[in-house]
């Protein structure tokens, strides 16, 4: 199973490293990353393979969201199937 993880917030040192660390701690493999800094806003999209994750997808999503709240970032983790369904006409 793959997931789409988005991160948006004020740019600061270590966002990519910390989000990647949460994934690594839960055996989630990051497949692809794109990020941009727009003025002082950090924007990132990750595609991650969660098939070997040591936690349920909802728990991973909660951990990422919690980290985001602690650091004034908006982080969403969405199952790839849901993401695809939402963007299909």
Image: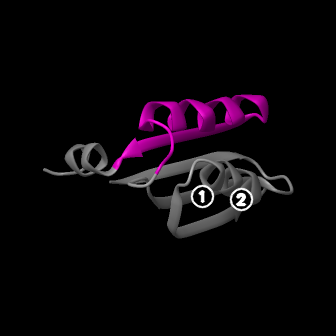
Q: Secondary structure at mark 2?
A: helix
Marks 1 and 2 close (CB-CB < 8 Å): yes
Residue at left 63%, top 46%? 8
Q: Position of residue 2 (x, y in %)?
A: 36, 56
Residue that carries the numbered disc 1 in the rendered image: 44
Q: Nearer the viewer, residue 38 or 31?
A: 31
Up-down relation of residue 42 to residue 55 (above or below)? below
Q: Residues within 10 Å of mark 1 (few under 14, many from 20)?
A: some
**Percent coordinates x, y for residue 6 in the rendering:** 53, 49
Of 39 and 2, nearer the camera is: 2
What x and y, as percent, mark residue 41?
A: 72, 52
The kind of secondary structure element at disc 1 is strand
Residue 21: assigned label: none
Which residue is under mark 2?
16
The magenta stretch spans which residues? Answer: 53-79
Depth check, front residue: 45 or 25: 25
Magenta span includes 70: yes
Q: Residue at x 79, y 52 (%)?
A: 11
x then y, percent, for residue 60: 53, 38
Q: Residue at x 61, y 48 (%)?
A: 7
Quarter the N terminus occupies:
bottom left
The answer to if 30 sits in the magenta stretch is no
For residue 58, which quarter of the picture? Answer: top left
């Amino acid at each position: 199973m793959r997931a789409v993880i988005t991160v948006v917030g004020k740019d600061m040192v270590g966002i990519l490293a910390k989000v990647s660390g949460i994934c690594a701690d839960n055996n989630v493999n990051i497949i692809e990353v794109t990020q941009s800094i727009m003025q002082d806003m950090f924007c990132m999209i990750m595609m991650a393979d969660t098939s070997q994750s040591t936690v349920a997808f909802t728990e991973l999503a909660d951990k990422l969201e919690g980290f985001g709240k602690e650091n004034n970032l908006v982080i969403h983790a969405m199952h790839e199937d849901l993401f695809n369904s939402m963007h299909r006409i």
